[in-house]
Image (spheres, grey):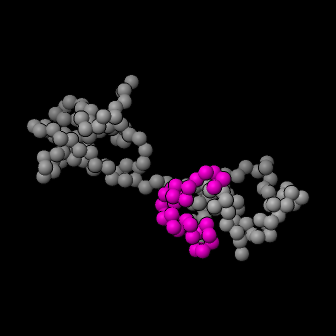
Amino acid sequence: MFVLNIRKIRLKRNITQKALADTLGVSRQALCMWEAEKRELKASTLKMIAGALNVTTDELITTPRAAKALNDPERRSTMLPNPKTPIKPLAAKPAEPKEIMFELNAAGVKKPAVTGSFINWDAKGIAMKKNLKGVYQASVLLKPGEYQYKFIADGNWWTDPANPATVSNG
């Protein structure tokens, strides 16, 4: 038998259940059940939680006896890991790529494309196709993050007229 310290560590780091659940890619309810020890936790999930909280799996689970000893100042030094031994935190689950739709509403344009930091500003870009409403579209699978992009239409580079957020190209 062991005691889970997920809630204690999460609260100490000011992380909400929702934020941790989103990071792990699970529902808030699943996290709530694990914190309350009402649902079994797989070892792989335990490792993901440890990585997300930047702790070791040993810090997440303790036996009731060890938990009691951690609160006893006389026994504390024997229960904690050696401070000279570095503890490498496990990496959190990488965020899944998402499909992003780029759209350009430009009549009379031939062969439009989208390019950007996600393809190292390739001058050919990713070809866009006209949909039934006459809007050019291109779908790109991207990992979460910040990217810059431009449209290329008939050899000219355009900023997105529908996106007011721009940055200087330096």
Looking at this view, name the residue that lies furthest to the right: 74
Above or below 137: residue 22: below
Please tell me which residue is depicted at 77% across the width and 65% down the height of the picture. Answer: 67
* Image point (27%, 45%), residue name: 102
Front residue of 74/83: it is 74
Residue nearest the observer in this picture, 84 or 133: 133
Residues in magenta, as a range: 11-40
| Residue 86 within the segment the image draws in magenta | no
Toward the left, the furthest residue is: 108
Residue 150, percent across and down? Answer: 28, 35
Residue 17 on the magenta segment:
yes
Give percent across and percent down for residue 80: 79, 57
Residue 65 shows up from this direction: yes
Quarter of the picture containing the N terminus is: bottom right
Residue drawn at 27 percent across, 33 percent down = 159
* Corner quadrant of residue 4: bottom right
Q: Residue furthest top?
A: 170
Pick the front one: 12 or 40: 12
Is residue 44 at least partly visible in the picture? no
What residue is rendered at 20% in x and 30% in y? 156
Residue 46: x, y in percent? Answer: 60, 64
Q: Is residue 77 left or right of residue 132?
A: right
Where 3 falls versus 100 (above or below)? below
Characterize the magenta stretch by its predominant secondary structure.
helix
List x then y, in percent, for residue 14.
Answer: 61, 51
| Residue 32 position by quadrant | bottom right
